[in-house]
Amino acid sequence: MRIRVHELHELSGAAKKIVSFAGDCKVWLFSGDLGAGKTTLIKEICRYFGVEDTVNSPTFSLVNEYSDRSGSKYYHLDFYRIKNEEEAYDIGAEEYLYSGDYCFVEWPSKIPSLLPSKVLSISIEIEDDGSRSLNVVKYD
């Protein structure tokens, strides 16, 4: 599935489409250049799910945990700063990824051997006009 987002206010519609497309897939991988909008899109997806916590980039903490109104957990992982997969093991990344809870993973290319086979991949490309092109693929 491909979604084009021209304006920030269009993200809520994009989030709704992505959630619908994902079905029961709970591990979502976000790829794109720095500043492409990975965290911004994750914020909108969390808003769609009813997350009440403040959603921000876990670049320094590596993992943020959020909850929705019913107490369901959502994990937001950012592996931009890690140097190798061993660091991801050290923070218990596999426990998050295989928890059965939603996991939103930025920079998944840094942890290829830790990723489950069933994932939703969301690649964000910045177009020449500044819009974003979201390529969404589900792997079962």
Image (tube, helix red, strand yellow):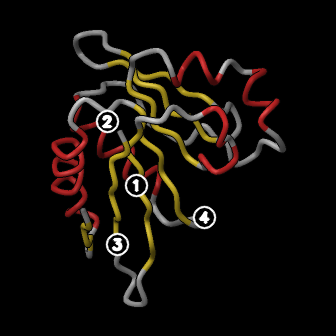
Q: Residues within 10 Å of mark 4 (few under 14, many from 20)?
A: few
Q: Residues within 10 Å of mark 3 (few under 14, many from 20)?
A: some
Q: Distance of mark 2 from mark 1, alpha carbons?
A: 15 Å
Nearer to us of marks 4 and 1 is 1
**Label located before the other in sequence (3 or 2):** 2
Q: Distance of mark 4 from mark 3, alpha carbons?
A: 15 Å
Q: Which residue is mark 2?
A: 46
Q: Report x, y in % for residue 15.
A: 23, 49
The residue at the point 64 percent across, 32 percent down is 114
Q: Residues within 10 Å of mark 1 (few under 14, many from 20)?
A: many
Q: Which residue is mark 1?
A: 122
Q: Residues within 10 Å of mark 2 (few under 14, many from 20)?
A: many
The residue at the point 64 percent across, 24 percent down is 93
Front-most of residues 33 and 21: 21
Q: Distance of mark 4 from mark 1, alpha carbons?
A: 14 Å
Q: Quadrant of the C terminus?
A: top left
The quadrant where residue 111 appears: top right
